[in-house]
Image (cartoon, rainbow, N blue to C red):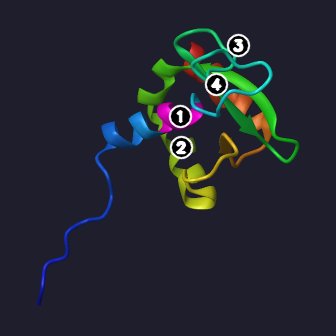
Amino acid sequence: MAIRKSTKLPQAEVIKQIVRRCSSFGKKQGYDEEGLPEDVPKGHFAVYVGENRTRYIVPISWLAHPQFQTLLQRAEEEFGFNHDMGLTIPCDEVVFEFLTSMIRS
């Protein structure tokens, strides 16, 4: 019986990929010369939540929080991270707001 090597990336590498992906959407209107959205403060990134893809700005520090990591795992399973749409979180806005209020506490 052969032992298979896991294809999953280490958590730190996945987080780096997410941050890179969320902050490199190209030079469009509303983006600075580095391709970063002008309305997103340093140390934050945008996510899109719910059916209407409501945009939320969240601190990068949340990437290390267990509840937020669960949301990221669901996003990866449902959408993957290899697309140009921005990070989409597959849950209702009410649930996202509840979870983020717990993270803020």
Asked which secondary structure carries label 1, the reply is: helix
**First in residue order: circle 1 vs circle 4:** 1
Question: What amino acid type should be assigned to the residue bearing mark 4?
Answer: Thr
Viewed as shown, does residue 20 lie left or right of 57?
Answer: left
Q: Which three-letter amino acid code belongs to the residue tagged 2?
A: Leu
As measured in the structure, the alpha-carbon distance from the residue carrying label 2 to the one carrying label 1 is 6 Å
Q: Is residue 7 above or below residue 45?
A: below
Res. 64 image quadrant: top left
Numbered circle sitting on residue 38: 3
Q: Are marks 2 and 1 in contact (CB under 8 Å)?
A: yes
Residue 93 as seen in the image, left or right of residue 32 = right
Q: What is the chief secondary structure element of the magenta stretch? A: helix
Residue at the spot of label 1: 68
Cα–Cα span, label 3 and label 2: 24 Å
Q: Quadrant of the N terminus?
A: bottom left
Upstream in the sequence, badge 3 or badge 2?
A: 3
- Structural distance between the alpha carbons of marks 4 and 3: 23 Å
The secondary element bearing badge 4 is classed as helix
Residue 100, label in figure: 4
C-alpha span from label 1 to label 4: 8 Å
Counting residues from the start of the chain, the first of labels 4 and 2 encountered is 2
Residue 77 position within the rendered picture, expressed as x and y whole percent measured from the top left: 55, 59
In the image, farthest residue toward the bottom: 1
Task: Please tell me whether mark 3 or mark 1 is closer to you in this view.
Answer: 3
Which one is earlier in the sequence, the residue at label 3 or at label 1? Answer: 3
Q: Alpha-carbon neighbours of circle 3 within 10 Å: few (<14), some, or many (≥20)? A: few
Please determine whether, in this image, residue 31 is positioned above or below residue 15.
above
The answer to whether residue 67 is seen in the rendering is: no
Which stretch is magenta? 18-22
Work out how far the residue at label 4 is from the one at label 2, CA to CA, in angstroms.
Answer: 13 Å
